[in-house]
Image (cartoon, grey):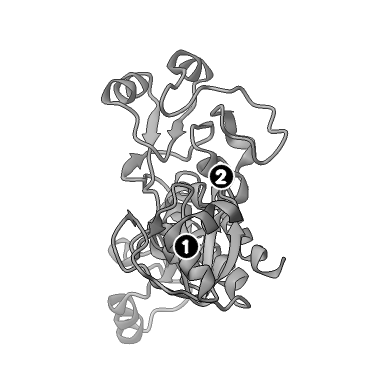
Amino acid sequence: MFNVKKCVSGALLAVLLLSGCSEEEKLPSEILVSSVTEIEESAPFPAISCGVKLEKAVEKAVSLSPAATEIICEAGFRERLVGVSDYCDYPENLGLPKLGSTENPDLDAIIKLKPDAVFTLSLLSEREIYKLNQAGIKVLTPKTPCNLEEYAALFKEISAAFYGNEQTDSLKGGTKALDEGKRARARLESAAKDVKTESFVYVTEKLTLAGADTFESAVLSLTGENLCKSEGYVPANGEQPAYIIASNKLTYDELAADEAFSAMIYNGAKVVFVNSERFERPSARTGEIFAAFSE
């Protein structure tokens, strides 16, 4: 982007006033200055994405994370994907080569595609990163979110690989990548606005509760208070919530057979099952969780 500033020389103005030179008279060459100067404020690249410096926009990308694949497509860069992981199944019908997973990536197949970058939410080994880097491929690993700020940052960091520092057209300024993050969070908050739980616990498929520092807690706390105040995932400990929100990989019978959860149900807790994959794959579809409350 360029900021055009009109430069008027004070010296030039003084000469005109004192000498009274006519239009036909030539001005001394030393005070002939351009009336317009173009100054480059900022270029889109080089830019930082996921802590990695990029000299240019990613034109060809490989995604080894289903969440990254969804976000790249949501941001409008689907056509830049040249390969995905074995687990990337959305959007449907991508029709791209399957390249293994973060646990077992097909490095030779990835290198043959000559992507600019590989996206993954799980760390590759040092050996794998080195081999890709030696082939001129950047490895971009955004942080898996644990709160709404990190959820927005996930969209921002991935988008920055394509937008760089490109500015928005908004009068408020900012970058397009930052806007992607803001929009993602706003969509999630909008999806939750009509859901009120007052208090809840979230039960994982392992029959543990999601603590206050988890992504599940951050998302569901848009509806009410998480009564599990611990960190990480812990056993139930006498909580009495208004809602038991549980992974859809569990059944009602499994909850009722557990002493802690049967006590919650006995005391009037409502049970709602949600698609836990939406937590495991943080993307725009995470907001679909709240639809379960109206079913």
Residue 71: x, y in percent? 55, 48
SS label for mark 2: helix
Question: Which of the two residues, 37 or 260, is positioned nearer the viewer here?
Answer: 260
Which residue, given by chain and number where applicable, does mark 2 sit on?
Answer: 72
Which residue, given by chain and number where applicable, does mark 1 sit on?
Answer: 261
Q: Are marks 2 and 1 in contact (CB under 8 Å)?
A: no
Q: Quadrant of residue 102?
A: top left
| Circle 1 Cα neighbour tier, 10 Å, few/some/many (<14 / 14–19 / ≥20) | many
Question: In the image, is residue 19 above or below residue 26?
Answer: below
Q: Can you see residue 79?
A: yes
Amino acid under disc 1:
Phe
Q: Can you see residue 219?
A: no
Amino acid under disc 2:
Ile
| Circle 2 Cα neighbour tier, 10 Å, few/some/many (<14 / 14–19 / ≥20) | many
Residue 249: x, y in percent? 57, 47
Residue at x 33%, y 41% (from the top left corner): 53
Residue 181: x, y in percent? 48, 60
Quadrant where the C terminus sits is bottom right
Q: Nearer the viewer, mark 2 or mark 1?
A: 1
Horizontal arrangement in the rendering, residue 194 relative to residue 247 (left or right):
right
The residues tagged by marks 2 and 1 sit, at their Cα atoms, a distance apart of 39 Å
Residue 264: x, y in percent? 48, 69
User: Which numbered tag is attached to residue 283?
Assistant: none
Residue at x 39%, y 62% (from the top left corner): 147
Residue at x 53%, y 34% (from the top left corner): 59
Residue at x 63%, y 40% (from the top left corner): 78
Q: Earlier in the sequence, mark 2 or mark 1?
A: 2
